[in-house]
């Protein structure tokens, strides 16, 4: 019988010889002294490695695993679908699972007059890429040939495909490839902790969004950028409320609603990247609903299947979709797709996950867990190298700085955030930083004691790297 599981020694050896990991310096990874963790199992908020060590999953397996590992209802949904069919083409065909999911996603947006349509893909970057191509082609087919400019927010990260990189503003990730991308206009990111217009002193224990002293210059900047060439701007792409890979930048309330009003005034399409913030993570089913905003395009991914299988979707307003309707001879077809579009197995998992989220009381219960996370994360204010602790829903970022009074960052060469997370592994926590911003994004199944244990393990890792008496 073929072997499908390696022993710990085999896994480590084969990994070293044949595997190239994403966002990983392989020279360091292959160092015999480097503690390479081989995940072998998981249950709820706990992961187990091949040697039997248990770790709390502090970032929901890279922001994807909403309900915890081996969630019984998602497991059962996948097994039921496996008994029928795992995959079939979606090109000129359909199945009996993807349409159910599309309808549920559209209804979840609670905007029937927008006549949203759903285009399925594989992950967040491909959902953004599809949204961009849809916007470009729709403008062309509507005869709006002057609307060729695209705007994005400073510090934005939307993925690593060429179009997504063009919309991003992350030198750390895309510096080498920038010459191969097209030019977009950047609007300053509304990051209250590092905003040059914020005149408030750093206050210990206070979210800078609440303590800021400014004239809302970020609101004025985006309005100026959108209004300056409104007739030539097609769309603005942005992450609502929280910019993930930028460093968990959290926007002041009202910023998204302000952008939406300007877009509506000038006929500019609002394209939202809800890949990280969607499905309850930011405090409502979708982050845009926190401000009553209905996007023209929206990309979702990551948690859509509860962290089980690759799937993403681009949700498009009827106004845009109609530009693609016509006889085949008119050449209006959207000639874009993926081999696994509408995959029945992934859609079955997503349906089960969405049903769990929409059950009475589930999103309400997350409000209690947000309070648990807020309470547990207060421990970080005890450390003098913590400059900011910010939270949106079940997303918490802890920004490390060299000098809190001046907000001077550590040198990127020091890799302080990475070292802290490596140290936290010794205390039973797995998470990954964004630069020197430590990340806590617990699965929704986490208990109060588990959330507290996650924060304590990360704090202990911080103290291992930057001892309290030597900071």
Image (tube, rainbow, N blue to C red):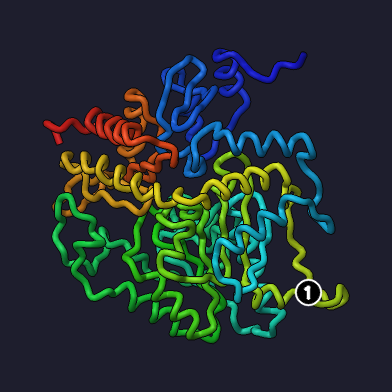
Q: Is residue 162 above or below residue 449?
A: below
| Residue 78 placement (x, y as % from top left) | 67, 37
Q: Nearer the viewer, residue 225 or 102?
A: 102
Quadrant location of residue 352? top right
Q: Is residue 258 above or below residue 466?
A: below
Is residue 419 visible to us here?
A: no
Q: Nearer the viewer, residue 117 or 406?
A: 117
Residue pointed to by mark 1: 332
| Residue 403 placement (x, y as % from top left) | 17, 47
| Residue 382 placement (x, y as % from top left) | 16, 40
Quadrant location of residue 128? bottom right
Determine whether, in the image, residue 386 is placed left or right of residue 292.
Answer: left
Is residue 402 visible to us here?
A: yes
Please give the name of the residue rendered at 51% of the width and 67% of the height, measured from the top-left corner. Answer: 237
Q: Nearer the viewer, residue 104 or 296?
A: 104
Please give the name of the residue rendered at 14% of the width and 55% of the height, measured from the top-left corner. Answer: 203
* Residue neighbourhood size for the residue with mark 1, other residues' Cα within 10 Å, grouped as few (<14), some (14–19), many (≥20): some
Q: Is residue 463 above or below residue 100?
A: above
| Residue 232 placement (x, y as % from top left) | 55, 83
Determine whether, in the image, residue 345 is placed left or right of residue 407.
Answer: right
Q: Quadrant of the C terminus?
A: top left
Label tally: 1
Determine whether, in the image, residue 200 is placed left or right of residue 177.
Answer: left
Local SS, label 1: loop
Q: Give the residue at the far left of this rendering.
A: 469
Q: Give the residue at the far front of this rendering.
A: 360
Q: Quadrant of the N terminus?
A: top right
Please give the name of the residue rendered at 39% of the width and 80% of the height, measured from the top-left corner. Answer: 223
Quadrant location of residue 55? top left
Please give the name of the residue rendered at 49% of the width and 43% of the height, measured from the top-left corner. Answer: 66
């Amino acid at each position: 019988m073929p072997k499908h599981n390696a022993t710990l020694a085999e896994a480590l050896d084969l990994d070293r010889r044949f595997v190239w990991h994403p966002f990983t310096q392989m020279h360091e990874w292959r160092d015999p002294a480097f503690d390479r963790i081989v995940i072998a199992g998981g249950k709820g908020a706990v992961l187990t490695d091949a040697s039997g060590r248990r770790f709390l999953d502090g970032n929901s397996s890279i922001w994807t695993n909403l309900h915890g590992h081996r969630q019984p209802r998602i497991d059962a949904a996948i097994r039921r679908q496996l008994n029928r069919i795992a995959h079939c083409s979606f090109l000129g065909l359909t199945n009996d699972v993807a349409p159910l999911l599309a309808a549920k996603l559209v209804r979840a947006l609670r905007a029937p007059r927008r006549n949203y349509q759903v285009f399925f893909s594989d992950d967040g970057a491909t959902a953004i890429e599809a949204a961009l191509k849809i916007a470009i082609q729709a403008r062309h087919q509507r005869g709006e040939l002057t609307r060729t400019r695209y705007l994005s927010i400073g510090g934005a990260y939307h993925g690593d495909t060429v179009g997504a990189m063009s919309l991003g503003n992350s030198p750390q990730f895309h510096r080498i490839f920038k010459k191969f991308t097209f030019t977009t206009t950047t609007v300053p990111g509304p990051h209250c902790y590092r905003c040059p217009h914020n005149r408030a002193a750093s206050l210990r224990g206070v979210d800078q969004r609440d303590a800021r002293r400014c004239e809302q210059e970020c609101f004025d900047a985006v309005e100026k950028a959108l209004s300056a060439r409104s007739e030539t701007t097609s769309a603005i792409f942005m992450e609502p409320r929280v910019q993930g890979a930028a460093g968990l930048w959290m926007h002041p309330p009202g910023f998204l609603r302000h952008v939406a009003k300007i877009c509506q005034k000038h006929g500019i399409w609002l394209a939202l990247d809800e890949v990280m913030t969607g499905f309850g993570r930011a405090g409502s089913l979708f982050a845009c609903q926190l401000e009553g905003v209905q996007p023209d395009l929206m990309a979702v991914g990551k948690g859509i299947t509860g962290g089980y299988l690759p799937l993403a979707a681009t949700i498009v307003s009827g106004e845009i979709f109609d530009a693609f309707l016509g006889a085949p001879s008119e050449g209006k077809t959207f000639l874009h797709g993926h081999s696994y579009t509408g995959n029945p197995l992934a859609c079955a998992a997503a349906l089960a996950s969405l049903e769990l989220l929409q059950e009475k009381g589930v999103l309400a219960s997350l409000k209690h867990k947000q309070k648990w996370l807020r309470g547990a994360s207060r421990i970080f204010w005890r450390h003098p190298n913590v400059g900011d602790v910010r939270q949106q829903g079940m997303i918490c970022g802890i920004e490390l700085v060299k000098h809190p009074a001046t907000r001077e960052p550590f040198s990127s060469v020091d890799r302080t955030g990475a070292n802290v997370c490596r140290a936290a592994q010794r205390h039973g926590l797995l998470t990954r930083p964004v630069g020197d911003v430590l990340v806590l994004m617990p699965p929704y199944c986490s208990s109060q004691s588990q959330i507290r244990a996650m924060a304590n393990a990360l704090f202990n890792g911080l103290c291992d790297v930057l001892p309290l008496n030597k900071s």
